[in-house]
Structure formats: C-alpha cells, structure tokens
Image (cartoon, helix red, strand yellow):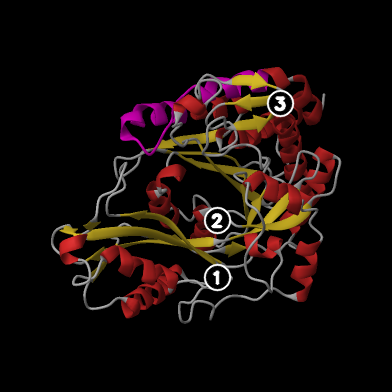
C-alpha cells in the first residue's frame, strides 16, 4: 500500500480524529478557556506521536498565555530540504451562539461539510499535514524531506508567545521553506496558491472636547462637537473614489508589474457572484485597478467603528465629551507599519482643530506585508501537488488578509512561505456555522503528500 492509498482507506478514521479535536473549545481570546487551549495542545502532541513524529515538545508561554507545540522528523538526509510546517489550534469565540444551526463544539457533518468552530480555521487544515506525515511514515517508513512542525495556541489572540519564540530559536526552526495552511482556494474545483498577503496597521482615535456631555440647545453653536470634528477627520482620510489622502501613504507601494497584472487577470474570478455574496449594489474602489487587484494587491484604509454620543432608542440632544474611532490600513509590499503609523497620526493631528484634544490607542498593532516569488522550487512543487491532488492546475493569487507569522518567518528565519490553503470562501471563518468541505480535507492530505514528495525530488 502506498501513502495515497493509506490516506484514502483511512478517511473515516481521520475524520473521527478531527471531530474529537474540534470538540475542545480552545478559545484563546478568553482566558477562562485557557485549560481548553492546553487540552487542545495535549491532544495535538498525542496525535503527532501516533503519526510517528519525534522530539515533540510542549512549550509553555513565558507570558502565562498559551503553549506552542514543536515536533520534527529529520532522517531524510542532509542533502534533502527541510520544511517548517505551521498551524494553530486555537479558535475564535463562537458568538452569537443562536445563529449556529448546530452547536459549535459538537461537530456535525451536513451535505459533505463538517460544521464546527475551528473546522477550517485552522484545526482541520493543520491536521491535514499531520495525517500526510503519518501516511508516508506508515507506508514508506520515511519522509522524502526533513520536517519540522511549530503550532501555536494564540493565533487568534495576537501570537505573542510565538513572536517571542521565533527570534530566540532560529537554529531549532532552521529550514529551507515554511508551509502554512491557513488560507483558501478559489473553489472546490479550482485550487489556487496565495503568493502575497497584505500587512496591517490598526489604530484608535479618541477626540475629547468639553469635560462633560452638554445640552445641544444650551451649548450648541458655542462648543465644538467632538462627533462633528471626528466626522471631518474621517472625511479627510480618504476620498470618494477610495484614494487614501494621508501624505506619503503611497510612497513605498511596490507597483504591480505588467507580468503580475497579466497573471492576476487570468484568475477565474466570478465578479458577479462575489458581488451577490456581499449584498452590495455595485463594486467600488480605485478606478485604475481591477477588482482582483484592489482586493489583494492595493493598500486600503477603513473605519471599523465609531463610538460616542447617544445611541439608544429615541432621541437625546447631547454634545458628547469624548468620541472614539477604530481605523485600519491594509498594507502591501513595501509599506512599513511603523512608518504608516507616523504618517497616519501626523495627518489626523494636522486636521484636528484646537477646540479638541486627540489621543491615539496604546494597544495598536501592525504586521508587515509579505510576498513570495512564485517561481522558486517549493512553489513549483506546490503547483504540481495541487494538480495531482485536485486534478486541476492551480492559479496564483494575492490575498487581502494578513497572516503575521508569514512576515515573521521572513524577518526572523529568512524563510519564504508556501501558502497551501484548502478552505473555501463559503467556510464562514470567524462566523456562525464555520465549516470545512470534506472533499477538500481528504484531497488536502493527498496534496500535502504530493508536495512533500515533489519537493523532495527538487
């Protein structure tokens, strides 16, 4: 029996094991669930032992947060490359619970989809590679490459423990390429490889005017309303066509080459279907770029929340003392979050009148964008692997979201990352009824086997 046959003959066993893992509510953002995150880590350790991995370590957080799990198998030989496989076993909170069709931690299979929190993001996708290693070791007795795993329990809550661990453990994590399955593909019958991710900078603005809330009839017209001021500031961040108005914001943006624009233009992107999914009346954005380019290869600025004044039922004529605003900017190569932070704050302060005071958030965060050369050997191996696993050649694409660990692998370990995702746009990540399309789970295991094999040949 070869490794592919092993994977196919053990589909139900692999599904039952994944369901067992998904029952653990490993919610990292709520420290009340810290024992459950620990339980999910322990479960992964046992699964890795069963798969035949070695040197398995449960690494405690120095910040009393959530653990890391390390494992390896390093007997392929010094002439073979080493793959560092990343995944995470923590999950988002399941709220609102009333919108789930089945309990989020009681996994249920419906219409060939596995419904549970963490099924796609990221327990299901992480488990794919554990099972691929198991299939190869059970049938071949060895792997075609050297393999290391580093899995975390804080991806959904900031990743502080892993960020601290990476620069201190460069030798332990030394590899030739990183492999991450925390993304998706275009559709169940059209695989895709993400070669670029946007970075992010997230900030908060507090605008304070009077020391107390004031009656608008008695004070309106004589006191500058912080909500009005905030409205003018927001209007000065971006024009009606989607162009960011912060001075210097576009200075470092790496422009798309003609070759890359042609590559992205080949994506079989269903614009009408995408628009229908959003419920919006029409697409919008920078007119010089296609929708695909805007969604993954251009920087953005968006307001996510405004808090202030009276928001309850009925009317209340009040000038609020302080109002708040949450803003993020998605960044592209070669934008630097720290530079963007200064440009953003300087621009906000330049627009603020002296009738108010401005304060920015203390717990802001950012991550740098990342891009991988799609012509390097591991990317070519991934292309062959998807073709073998799905029966169709993948397309290359850039994604608008951020995966901070990819940039950290580049910065601290000098590693390029192959983003080998198996999720679908309909997986409802971070939402009620999260699900993982089971054919993608099974084909994912086969694709991972093919990738390790093809990269071993390279």
Q: Position of residue 74 (x, y in %)?
A: 61, 42
* Image quarter of the C terminus: bottom right
- If the image is split into quadrants, where does the N terminus sit? top right
Magenta stretch holds residue 28: yes
Looking at the image, do the residues carrying marks 1 and 3 touch, with CB atoms under 8 Å apart? no
Give 345 or 53, whichever is nearer the viewer: 345
Q: In the image, is residue 458 above or below residue 233?
A: above
Residue receiving disc 1: 240
Residue 406 numbered tag: 2
Q: Give me the C-alpha separation between circle 2 and circle 1.
A: 33 Å
Q: Is residue 141 visible?
A: no
Mark 3, residues whose alpha carbon is within 10 Å: few (<14), some, or many (≥20)? some
Report which quarter residue 424 is drawn in: top right
Q: Seen in the image, is 315 located left or right of residue 9?
A: left
Write down the residue under mark 3.
138
Circle 2 or circle 3, nearest the eye: 2
* Magenta span of residues: 13-42
Residue farthest along the front direction in this orientation: 217
Q: Earlier in the sequence, mark 2 or mark 3?
A: 3
Q: Is residue 363 left or right of residue 166?
A: left
Tag 3's secondary structure? helix
Chain-order first, disc 2 or disc 1:
1
Quick one: label 1, few (<14), some, or many (20+) residues within 10 Å? few
Tell me the mark number nearer the camera, choosing from 2 and 1.
Answer: 1
Residue 354 visible? The answer is yes
Find the distance from the CA under tag 1 to the CA under tag 3: 59 Å
Q: How many marks?
A: 3
**In the image, 202: left or right of 105?**
left
Q: For residue 103: magenta?
A: no
- Dot 1 or dot 3: first in sequence order is 3
Do the residues under discs 2 and 1 have CB atoms within 8 angstroms?
no
SS class of the residue under badge 2? helix
């Amino acid at each position: 029996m070869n490794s592919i046959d092993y994977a196919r003959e053990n589909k139900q066993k692999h599904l039952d094991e994944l369901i067992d893992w998904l029952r653990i509510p490993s919610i990292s953002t709520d420290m009340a669930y810290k024992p459950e995150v620990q339980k999910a880590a322990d479960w992964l350790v046992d699964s890795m032992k069963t798969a035949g991995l070695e040197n398995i370590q449960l690494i405690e957080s120095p910040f009393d947060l959530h653990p890391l799990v390390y494992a390896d198998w390093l007997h392929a030989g010094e002439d073979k490359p080493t793959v560092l496989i990343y995944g995470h076993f923590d999950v988002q909170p399941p709220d609102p619970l009333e919108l789930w069709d089945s309990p989020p931690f009681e996994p249920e299979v419906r219409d060939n989809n596995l419904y549970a929190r963490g099924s796609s993001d990221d327990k299901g996708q992480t488990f794919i590679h554990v099972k691929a290693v198991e299939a190869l070791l059970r049938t071949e007795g060895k792997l075609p490459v050297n393999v290391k795993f580093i899995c975390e329990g804080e991806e959904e809550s900031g990743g502080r423990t892993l960020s601290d661990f990476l620069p201190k453990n460069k030798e332990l994590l030394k590899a030739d390429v990183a492999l991450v399955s925390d993304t998706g593909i275009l559709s169940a019958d059209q695989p895709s490889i993400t070669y670029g991710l946007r970075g992010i900078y997230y900030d908060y603005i507090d605008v304070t005017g009077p020391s107390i809330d004031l009656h608008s009839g008695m004070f309106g017209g004589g006191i500058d309303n912080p909500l009005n001021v905030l409205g003018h500031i927001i209007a000065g961040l971006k024009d009606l066509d989607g162009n960011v108005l912060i001075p210097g914001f576009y200075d470092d943006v790496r422009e798309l080459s003609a070759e890359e624009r042609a590559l992205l233009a080949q994506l079989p992107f269903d614009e009408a279907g995408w628009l229908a999914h959003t419920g919006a009346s029409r697409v919008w954005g920078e007119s010089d770029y296609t929708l695909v380019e805007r969604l993954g290869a251009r920087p953005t600025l968006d307001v996510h929340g405004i808090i202030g004044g009276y928001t309850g039922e009925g009317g209340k004529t009040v000038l609020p003392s302080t109002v708040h605003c949450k803003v993020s900017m998605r960044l592209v190569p070669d934008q630097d979050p720290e530079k963007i932070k200064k440009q953003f704050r300087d621009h906000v302060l330049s627009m603020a009148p002296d009738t108010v005071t401005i304060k920015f958030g203390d717990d802001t965060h950012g991550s740098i964008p990342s891009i991988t050369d799609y012509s390097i050997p591991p990317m070519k191996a991934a292309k062959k692997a998807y073709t073998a696993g799905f029966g169709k050649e993948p397309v290359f694409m850039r994604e608008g979201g951020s995966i901070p660990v990819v940039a950290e692998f580049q910065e601290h370990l000098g590693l390029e990352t192959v983003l080998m995702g198996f999720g679908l746009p309909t997986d409802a990540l971070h939402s009620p009824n999260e699900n993982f399309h089971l054919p993608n789970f099974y084909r994912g295991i086969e694709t991972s086997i093919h990738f390790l094999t093809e990269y071993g040949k390279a």
